[in-house]
Amino acid sequence: MGTVVCATHLQLGEPVAIKFLNPEAAEDDDSRCRFLREARTSARLRNEHVARLMDYGVCEDGSPILVMEFLAGEDLGQALHRRGPLPVDEVVEYLLQACEALAEAHARGLVHRDLKPSNLFLTRGADGDPLVKVLDFGISKSYAGGADDSLNAKITGSYGLVGSPAYMSPEQISGQDVCPKTDIWALGVVMYECLIAECPFERRSMAEVFVAVLKNDPPPLQSKRGDVPESMEKLCGWCLHKATEGRCPSVVSFAEELFQVAPTDARRVMVRRIRRLAQAAHTDSDRTEGSESPPIAGTSVTAWKRTRAVRRLRPSVRSIAALLAVVPVVAFVAALATARLTKPAQDGVAGTQAEAPTSPVQVTSGPDGPPARSGVPPSSSSGVSASASAGAAASVTKLREKSSTPPITTTGAARGAASRSPKPPSNLLDQWEPLQSP
């Protein structure tokens, strides 16, 4: 259906792989939908064991193209044809790496539906170690529903059965709904083929393949190869169980059992990473509420949505700790600001009360002595003195209300008397010297 060529990026000078549809497939709407689905799925998956998509576009004639990272090496099918059965340790390594890619895909609600040796590409990482890349998500399906359901319907409606018959699960052949266990079946078939270099359900016709998948059990591995561990034999039989209820439930369970066959420290880390990928609740922007799906195989969509709703209402520990740390600081700042705003007002009220005269006082002056005070009401001859005192008191009160700084609104002689006084006056009238009577 498509062709992959090697090209060079003109600006970067790096090699890339360009995949485009053949002319007859480019005119078919279903083939174009499958091509677009492969681009969308590859863009969503960020695992290092998935071929990285660099760009998607349309040529001048309208045919779509995919620009992917260039991979040097060969696929697993070519390696089996060239080398024959692979060592047990090597098979464990390849399948665990493939499980990483599937763990992320299943966590996003995607089923590959076409796992086979030719879609597992063997290359080398930056450190030189073997690296498996899972290819061709063109017929992958969202088993929990989502935005790409229209593409699922077009692809399935056109081809009827999608996938490679010898690697298809019984539910695929029967036309039932697929789930992550569909990929588990394909992993079991690939493991069987890697160990003895032949597919357990390969037959001369497609009808015989379907009968073998639905009715027949493959020959035991140990009858074909004596050095296969018994635990690996049991795991393969668990993956190839006809009914989904009795099959290995998830890639996590598959990876944990496969790790026991040939355990190493590096593979223990890999299993932990697979477990984290499968349990991760992704919140990417390309996932809507209707397309979110259970992170672990076997969990119902209804239970998953109910759990997510409860999680939204439950505050996180970090949020509570941050709130408890901020509240005391805010309370302290508010109390400090309130104290600063209240103090000037209290000082102004106290100053006004202290400075206001309680009774009219007549100030007179003798020719040879200091001013004398009396509680007698001011006479007509001292009206100027009382009027000046009242005006000065009103002036001081207004200035007190505008500023917390003690106001000084006096005559020059009064300012001199006030500067010579060691203590603040107890009465407003102490700030002025008496006016000379006419």
Image (cartoon, rainbow, N blue to C red):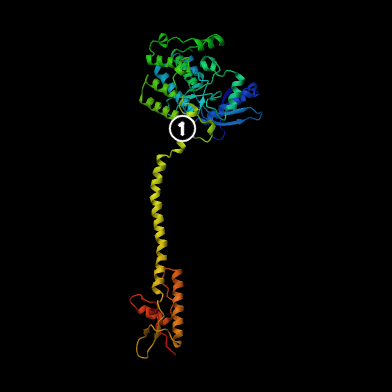
Disc 1 target residue: 307
Using the image as rendered, state which of residue 6 and residue 139 is in the foreground: 139
| Amino acid type indicated by mark 1 | Thr
Q: Quadrant of residue 351?
A: bottom left
**Residue drawn 39% across the image and 56% down it:** 335
**Residue drawn 41% across the image and 20% down it:** 92
**Residue drawn 38% across the image and 16% down it:** 231
Q: Is residue 137 above or below residue 332?
A: above
Q: Quadrant of residue 249?
A: top left
Residue 149, image x and y in percent?
Answer: 58, 27
**Residue drawn 42% across the image and 10% down it:** 220
Residue 272, image x and y in percent?
Answer: 39, 28
Give SS at disc 1: helix
Residue 211, image x and y in percent?
Answer: 53, 10
Visible in this render: residue 1? no
Using the image as rendered, state which of residue 273 and residue 313 is in the foreground: 313
Using the image as rendered, state which of residue 49 and residue 433 is in the foreground: 433
Visible in this render: residue 314? yes
40 displayed left or right of 261? right
Which quadrant of the figure contains the C terminus? bottom left
Using the image as rendered, state which of residue 380 and residue 81 is in the foreground: 380
